[in-house]
Image: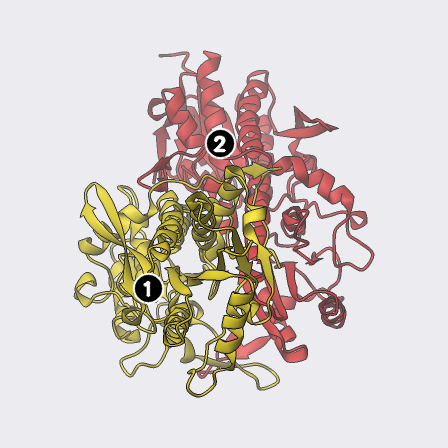
Chain colours: A red, B yellow
Amino acid sequence: MSNQVNLLVAQSGGPTVAINASLAGVISQSMASGKIDKVFGAKNGIQGVLKEELIVLSDIFDNEEKIKDLQHTPSMYLGSCRYKLKDPHQDESDYLRIIEVLKKHNVKYFFYIGGNDSMDTVAKLSKYAEDMNDEIYVMGVPKTIDNDLRAIDHTPGFGSAAKYIATSILEIAHDTAIYDMESVLIVEIMGRNAGWLAASSVLARTEYSTAPDLIYLPERPFSTASFVNDVRQLLKKKKQIIIAVSEGICDVEGTYVSSQEANTDQFGHVRLSGTGKYLEHLIHDTIGCKVRSVELSVLQRCASHIASRTDLEEAFELGKRGVDYAMEGATGYMVRLLRTCEEPYTVEYSIEDIDKIANEERRVPQEWINESGNDVTEEMVTYLKPLIQGESFVTYQNGLPSYLFIKL
Amino acid sequence: MSNQVNLLVAQSGGPTVAINASLAGVISQSMASGKIDKVFGAKNGIQGVLKEELIVLSDIFDNEEKIKDLQHTPSMYLGSCRYKLKDPHQDESDYLRIIEVLKKHNVKYFFYIGGNDSMDTVAKLSKYAEDMNDEIYVMGVPKTIDNDLRAIDHTPGFGSAAKYIATSILEIAHDTAIYDMESVLIVEIMGRNAGWLAASSVLARTEYSTAPDLIYLPERPFSTASFVNDVRQLLKKKKQIIIAVSEGICDVEGTYVSSQEANTDQFGHVRLSGTGKYLEHLIHDTIGCKVRSVELSVLQRCASHIASRTDLEEAFELGKRGVDYAMEGATGYMVRLLRTCEEPYTVEYSIEDIDKIANEERRVPQEWINESGNDVTEEMVTYLKPLIQGESFVTYQNGLPSYLFIKL
């Protein structure tokens, strides 16, 4: 077919449970449009384009049911990469190769689903194509559990991670409350330099449980003296304390707390213990009560069985809307959602210039953290609440969630 | 009422997601029998009896819906304790106090839901009551995620923990597979000296994923040299390796692997790093590829949202059957289930003399572990599979599982 118009999509960065939902949205809307012949997927992000490792997604996902299966599958169906394009003025070779592969396969639309670094690729590639007068439309679709992208109300993947975190802390609160003795349990939560994920632990609070009793975010300098004092004061009022802490908390000089305990093993190797472990040791050494730390680790970004339906549906919709915008001629944009109403919760979809988004971090506003820096405010709760609503539509086979596997 | 006959129930040991289901079964059947006036619950196990801290469960759970809510609530509604009764020939005071409290409240039936240590209490107390000719019937109801009780096909709580573990490893397999590079991920699983829980990771294997690629149980001596060799050999065949390991693995001399890495912090404190961390460091130092360890920690015993329906239903039934047996005059027994058919899976309920159960550990049979000691056999898979079938009937409120809280 001489007038064949194709779309190519790839995924990049760290996994979330919603990134395949956006992929499903892109495939679904492309085929529904009647204007796209094939949807290609590149394996392992932009590296798959460079290596011309493509699969035909529109052949694989040729009915509603398969699209649905993809929508609730965790991680990235197409695999990922962490690859940063160089400045084309210094080294043009990657760009020449990408355009060559796209043209060879009649690709008019290139979609990149990812976080901050992926939006950098969208920015550079769209600019390059425009400068070269290549008729290629480049669109970014956001995702990151960290919720640290600008110009969007919240990122796909975040709501599901928040739901996992809140559910886990609620269940840990049950587990901890059974013994009639003083205890401290510290939950270490992801998020790098942004406290959104640790803040979402606040949703675990119910009419019967105050856990987490203390919340520490990287947006405030962390003081070990204040921390120990907070715990001491609270132990006078209640026996079991649960603490949510962001992996990225730093002291007043900006040094990661996790790097402040350098253990040495028998061979003299230096090991970093992690934020949770460091605080566990601190409580043990200063207060001396029963103390345990739990690191939610990768589970918070891949537990699709407890995904937020709101999150999965929004991620799907973002993929769809991105296709609509690209077909109207948009390039160098990221598709996004903005909240239009708090109660009932509604959002509106639009696009934003990629240059206003790429390489910038959005952190928790100071006014959403309490004065003592050990909790979040009601504004944060209001912001977070709608994002975890609704349950995943995962199906089970032989007692396990039924997922599609990564196509590598 | 002069002829009032009451039942008292308490919970003990570590939490599981099924122990409240057994409690629900005890309450439900007691009230259905028409022979019990009140069901009392003692707070914090046998300590609540000693302190006479009782609540009237039959008043609280007076309809089907409330019973159902209790059935899917994690941890222990009545709280727990770790309290061992002394030999009555050395110190009779606890026994005298317990009998006094039971008689004061017209308690004819005493139920204790717990693991190994709790069955020791059932054994001692039933023997004492018999010796004293007190008409008190003592019944044990089993629970433990570790599945290490004798004379029962499997313990309530185990199936749900197994389902959580298998689901988590399946989701971790997705998370790990996205990058085109060598990596090793080690999952540390509970179970103390028994490998049942670590073995249940095998259920994560699907037609598309071989994870966990290696499984190490405490029933075989662990050799670091063989372990590193296993990983090296496997890395020649595949890029991403996922390893399931029991927290309780020991070397050939019986020393816990977790105690073999004594880190020292800046103050000279010795810290044990845990089995997973130890193996992570070992791979880092010997093979040097990307390596991470994940400790499932308390989540594997409290994640009710991913409980096994089979487990919750069996736990409920065990509570009910226990009441039936006690009313027929049984004392000094544990109610149990035995598998009567593999395909379709069926079980039969009965009771077993408590002396054949208390204080004995059941470990994984050697023939269910492969020759190299790095995997389990098909017999293990056949045994485990029915136990994780069916999903929890948990309900959600505001995006979170809706649970009853501990009544302390």
Q: How many marks?
A: 2
The subunit carrying tag 1 is: B
Q: For the residues tagged 1 and 2, is the chain the same?
A: no
Choose between A234 and B97: the one closer to the eye. B97
Q: CA distance from mark 1 to mark 2?
A: 53 Å
Residue A363 as seen in the image, left or right of residue B337: right
Q: At which x and y percent is residue A229?
A: 76, 71
Residue name at image x 40 percent, y 63 percent: B137
Q: At which x and y percent is residue B180?
A: 38, 49
Q: At which x and y percent is residue A185?
A: 60, 64
Note whether residue B300 is visible: yes
Quadrant in which the C terminus of chain B is drawn: bottom right
Residue B254 as seen in the image, left or right of residue A157: left
> Relative to A238, does residue B257 appear above or below in the rendering?
below
> Relative to B282, does residue B370 appear above or below in the rendering?
above
Q: Amino acid at mark 2?
A: Ala
Helix, strand or loop at label 1? It is strand
Choose between B279 and A108: the one closer to the eye. B279
Query: Which of pointers 1 and 2 indicates the residue nearer the eye?
Result: 1
Residue name at image x 56 percent, y 56 percent: A174
Please identify the quarter of the rendering in which residue B242 is found. Answer: bottom left
Q: Amino acid at mark 1?
A: Tyr
Please identify the quarter of the rendering in which residue A313 is found. Answer: top right
Q: At which x and y percent is residue A243?
A: 65, 60
Specify the label residue A21 is tagged with.
2
> Relative to A131, does residue B18 appear above or below in the rendering?
below
The subunit carrying tag 2 is: A
> Relative to B333, does residue A199 appear above or below in the rendering?
above
Note whether residue A87 is visible: no
Choose between B223 and B184: the one closer to the eye. B223
Residue name at image x 45 percent, y 84 percent: A266
The residue singled out by tag 1 in the image is B333
